[in-house]
Amino acid sequence: MMLFNALINKEITRELIDGEVEKLTDSEIREAIQAMVAEDRLDLAAAISTAALVMRPNSEDILAISGLLCMVQGEWDNAVELLEALLTIQGEHAPPQTYLMLAKSLRCAFLVGSAMEMVKFGLKHHFNDQALAAEFKELQALNMAGDAAGWQSVAGSA
């Protein structure tokens, strides 16, 4: 609880992270990372995320916020890895946002064909989700633009 209070009071150090993260709940860790990102303290957010992932590698809260943190930092391969782990844990109960964030990470990692497949998979489970449908249209347009420019089809590269 000391870490959470220190975050509120902006008295956090890396040393405090190591000893205190294990005392926090998953939701408190998520909130701590969110607070650090909001204050543009990405190095400390990453330190909290790393410590939390070591202690609780199967926590949905920690995988989700850590995946989003990687997206903010442009660490696409790490984001894909974390969000794939999250999707595996959530299984058939995965919300549309998991599919969408994973597809966006795949797209940014230049795995557009894989992103398209992820969106299709998400739409099978959430066929009325507007954000997934919009991402599908964007990926289709990207694929068609690539075909028109003579690029290799990204849909076939997955």
Image: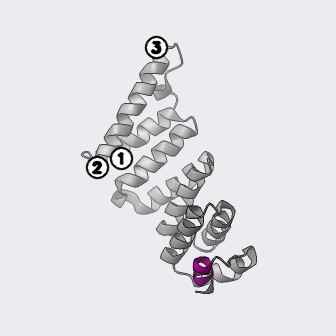
Name the mark nearer the viewer: 3 or 2.
3
Label 3 and label 2: CA atoms lie apart by 31 Å
Q: Residue 5: percent from the left, percent from the top? A: 58, 83
Q: Residue 30: percent from the left, percent from the top? A: 52, 70
Residue furthest to the right: 15
Dividing the picture into quadrants, the one containing residue 21 is: bottom right
Q: Which residue is mark 3?
A: 148
Q: Going 43% across and 36% down the picture, which residue do you hit?
A: 116
Q: Amino acid at mark 2?
A: His
Residue furthest to the left: 128
Q: Residue 57: percent from the left, percent from the top? A: 57, 68
Q: Going 47% across and 17% down the picture, which residue do you hit?
A: 147
Q: Which residue is mark 1?
A: 122
Residue 58 shows in this picture: no
Q: Which residue is mark 2?
A: 126
Which span is picked out in magenta? Answer: 4-9
Q: Amino acid at mark 1?
A: Gly
Tag 3's secondary structure? helix
